[in-house]
Image (tube, grey):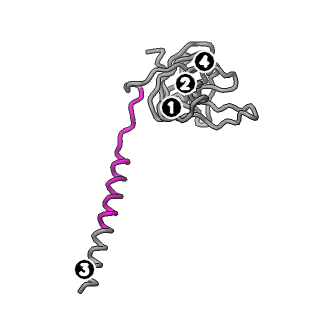
């Protein structure tokens, strides 16, 4: 009889653990994606953002990573990635590194090289670098929108 009681307890515990996993999965599956355009953001210049990440990465990660930022700066280059999304590179104060902004919308010529723009997106932090080899990491923003045209 004791064996049956122990097995029932194990079954109940396993069921509760399974139900917890299902509930967590359901929550994340149905979680709404942040509306970047209409969300509040922290404003920072491209040069300041890069300086903070390069000088104090621990503090920068806590303060900026996975946060919605509005970064202002001068456009250095406009390219496309492999998914054909527009990439806007903002000057960072280091000629070998940039604030790399992956745009959500087509640019339609509203951003040009040397323009001073304000771009809103989610900061993903700084990429890998090797200063001994002269390779500096970019700071990455994803899901970006041009706030200058608003």
Location of residue 57 in the rendering, given as x and y in whole percent from the top left corner: 56, 33
Residue placed at 58% from the left, 25% from the top?
Answer: 50
Question: N-terminal of the two: label 4 or label 1?
Answer: 4
Image-based side of 71 in relation to 80, left or right: left
Location of residue 68 in the rendering, given as x and y in whole percent from the top left corner: 44, 29
Q: Which mark is residue 5?
A: 3
CA gap between label 1 and label 3 equals 53 Å
- Above or below residue 1? Residue 135 is above
- Asked whether 111 or 101 is in front, the reply is 101
Question: N-terminal of the two: label 2 or label 3?
Answer: 3
Residues marked 2 and 1 touching at CB (< 8 Å)? yes
CA gap between label 4 and label 3 equals 70 Å
Image quadrant in which you'd find residue 140: top right
Q: Specify whether residue 25 is painted magenta.
A: yes
CA gap between label 4 and label 1 equals 18 Å
The majority secondary structure of the magenta stretch comes to: helix
- Above or below residue 52? Residue 11 is below
Q: Which residues are magenta?
A: 14-36
Which residue in the protein does label 4 denote? 75
- Asked whether 94 or 24 is in front, the reply is 94
Q: State the SS at label 3.
A: helix
Which residue in the protein does label 2 denote? 49
Image quadrant in which you'd find residue 15: bottom left
CA gap between label 2 and label 3 equals 61 Å
Question: N-terminal of the two: label 4 or label 3?
Answer: 3
Question: N-terminal of the two: label 1 or label 3?
Answer: 3
Which residue in the protein does label 1 denote? 123
Q: Residues within 10 Å of mark 4 (few under 14, many from 20)?
A: many
Q: Residues within 10 Å of mark 1 (few under 14, many from 20)?
A: many
Q: Which mark is residue 150?
A: none
Question: N-terminal of the two: label 4 or label 2?
Answer: 2
């Amino acid at each position: 009889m004791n064996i049956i009681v122990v097995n029932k307890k194990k079954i109940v515990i396993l069921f509760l653990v399974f139900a917890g996993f299902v509930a967590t999965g359901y929550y994340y599956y149905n979680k709404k994606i942040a509306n970047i355009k209409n969300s509040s953001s922290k404003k920072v210049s491209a040069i300041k953002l890069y300086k903070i990440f390069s000088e104090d990465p621990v503090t920068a990660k806590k303060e900026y990573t996975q946060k919605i930022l509005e970064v202002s700066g001068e456009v250095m280059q406009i390219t496309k990635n492999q998914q054909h999304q527009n990439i806007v590179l903002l000057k960072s104060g280091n000629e070998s590194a940039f604030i790399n902004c992956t745009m959500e919308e087509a640019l339609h010529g509203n951003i040009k090289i040397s323009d001073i723009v304000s771009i809103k997106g989610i900061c993903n932090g700084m990429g890998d670098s090797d200063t001994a080899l002269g390779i500096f990491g970019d700071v990455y923003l994803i899901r970006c929108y041009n706030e200058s045209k608003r």
